[in-house]
Amino acid sequence: MSDVAIGVDVGGTKSLALLVARDGRVLGERVEATPHEPANAPGHATAATVEKLVRALCEPLGLRPDALPVGLGLAGMVRRDGRLAFAPNLPGASGAEVGTLLGVALGSSLVVVENDANCAARAEHAWGAARGVANFVMVTLGTGIGGGVVSNGSLMRGQSGFAGEIGHMVVAAHGAPCPCGGRGCWERYASGGGLRRLALEAISEGRLADLAESVGDVADLRAEDVVTRARAGDAEALSLMAEMGWWLARGVANLSAILDCGHFLVGGGLGAASELFLPSTRTALVHLVEGYHARAEITVTPSLFGPRSGALGAALVALERLT
Ligand SMILES: [Zn+2]
């Protein structure tokens, strides 16, 4: 029985791997850019990147990569059997058996695959900001929006394992196109990718001139650039963060109507800038949630582990299912 596991969170932009003890302590950390997959071999480049991360964590400690449980959190629709059925933010790996490919590369049968935001929810529930909370929704703001819904203490799975794809809930009919093929999905308005899109839209309308000038070519603009400008006190950047906060509230209000859930945890890369948008989210919720004052309090708070919760949770899932 292993007392440690490796959790890897494969996001749309970065892949983070953590070596994690059974009590949640992080013993090692490695990060790589998530690769672009060639069309003729879906999933192979992702599996190779994860293999590199796993070996890099094992080597300095003399651990055997084929003997350690490895949990893989993937940004997309992960079936109960571990197959990545559809992944608009990992387009090259969509439909691939990434877990099987990784197992072959490592010579290991100890690989388990789960949705990345479900992993984040598990970590926050076990060790983080949702300890002892029976009903909450984990909202991860990265390239897209991931979701993990915990109801009566258990992760909601749905008939195929796809429950919690909250980023593709439509918040603007006929709105911005989404990589999933739809339009107006929540993540086009309230994620890192959504913030970037909102910023580009604002620049095309003649707003955010200082931000546009500071990045030079707007094609290179990142969500982090907006956050940096907002933290420096740029009024237009602050206003855009508040606008994103309103869109976050729009989706939270929809989820409140469906789930009657009182707690929302905000994580992912953009979650680290939550002080710039959560005040706006909380103000907007009062107007957007049906019967707001008739309900118990609705909290929207930062997660404890931020961008690390997915990898931590992937390790936890590996420990739970493989040891
Ligand atoms: Zn979508």
Image (tube, grey):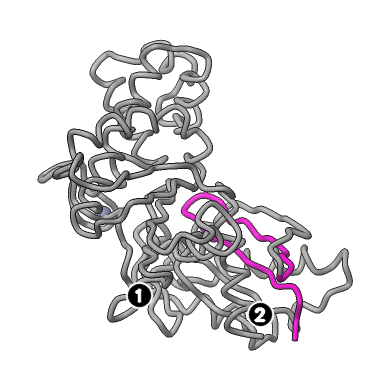
- The residue at 77%/63% (across/down) is 56
Disc 1 residue crowd, few under 14, some 14–19, many 20+, Cα 10 Å: some
- The residue at 30%/14% (across/down) is 207
Most frequent secondary structure within the magenta stretch? strand
The magenta-colored residue range is 1-22
Quadrant hosting ligand 1: bottom left
Left or right: 314 in relation to 29: left
Secondary structure category for the residue under label 1 = loop
- The residue at 57%/64% (across/down) is 126
Find the distance from the CA under tag 1 to the CA under tag 2.
29 Å
Q: Are marks 1 and 2 in contact (CB under 8 Å)?
A: no
Q: Give me the disc on residue 105.
A: 2
Residue 280, quarter of the rendered image: top left
x and y percentages locating residue 65 in the rendered image: 76, 77
Left or right: 7 in relation to 191: right
x and y percentages locating residue 133 in the rendered image: 46, 59
Residue 46, quarter of the rendered image: bottom right
Q: For the N terminus, which image quadrant?
A: bottom right
x and y percentages locating residue 91 in the rendered image: 39, 61
- The residue at 43%/17% (across/down) is 211
Secondary structure category for the residue under label 2 = helix
Q: For this rendering, which residue is in front, 175 or 131? A: 131
Residue 95, quarter of the rendered image: bottom left
Q: For the C terminus, which image quadrant?
A: bottom right
Marks 1 and 2, the one that precedes in the sequence: 2
Give the residue pinned by disc 1. 157
Instruction: Please check the rendered image and state whether residue 282 is part of the magenta-colored stretch, yes or no.
Output: no
